[in-house]
Amino acid sequence: MQKSVILTSFLLLNLSVNLIFSLSAGAQTQSALNLPADDQAEEILRAEIYTEARSPVDGRFLSAKEYVELQEDLGKLDGATAAFLVSPKLRELIELLKLRRTIRQIIPFLP
């Protein structure tokens, strides 16, 4: 009789724990499915057509037409003219920094 009471209480405890966990998991699943009204699914956002963009030059907002025109203008710049967009002093400084980085890889204790 003692064993049957212990076994019955153990089974009731196990059943109640399983029931509590299943109810809490169901509540979490339900709360995860309730999206806020302003939150759109990723599939919808991927299919959305963008009508505004930011300028890669200065970060201001552009219409789609202005963005395409800016991309065409930037595409017209070839490598030779792009080199002249950076001042010679800045180009020299960049080259010196690259040289310093290379030397520091060989001799790491130099400042």
Image (tube, rainbow, N blue to C red):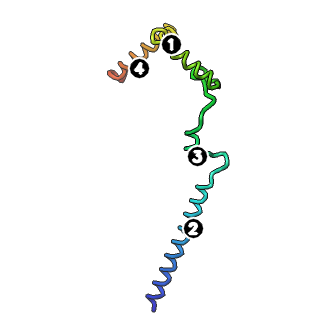
Instruction: Name the residue that disc number 3 marks.
Output: 41
Closer to viewer: mark 1 or mark 4? 1
Q: Is residue 30 left or right of residue 5?
A: right
Place of residue 39 in the rendered image (x, y in percent of width and height, measured from the top left): 63, 46
Callout 4 touching callout 3 (CB < 8 Å)? no
Give the Cα separation between the discs numbered 2 and 3: 26 Å
Closer to viewer: mark 4 or mark 2? 2
Closer to viewer: mark 1 or mark 2? 1
Instruction: Name the residue that disc number 1 marks.
Output: 77
Pointer 4 or 3: first along the chain: 3
Q: Can you tell which quarter of the image residue 54 is in?
A: top right
Give the Cα separation between the discs numbered 4 and 2: 63 Å
Out of 68 and 78, give the one closest to the viewer: 68
Q: Is residue 87 left or right of residue 64?
A: left
Pointer 1 or 4: first along the chain: 1
Callout 1 touching callout 2 (CB < 8 Å)? no
- What residue do we see at 59% from left, 62% from top? 27
Neighbours of disc 2 within 10 Å: few (<14), some (14-19), many (20+): few
The kind of secondary structure element at disc 2 is helix
Pointer 2 or 3: first along the chain: 2
- What residue do we see at 51% from left, 13% from top? 76
Callout 4 touching callout 2 (CB < 8 Å)? no
Give the Cα separation between the discs numbered 1 and 4: 38 Å
Residue type of the residue flagged with mark 3: Ala
Of the numbered discs in the image, which one, if any, rests on residue 23?
2
- What residue do we see at 61% from left, 57% from top? 31
Is 51 situated above or below 26? above
Place of residue 70 in the rendered image (x, y in percent of width and height, measured from the top left): 58, 18
Closer to viewer: mark 4 or mark 3? 3
Instruction: Name the residue that disc number 4 marks.
Output: 111
Q: In this view, does 16 lie to the left or right of 65?
A: left
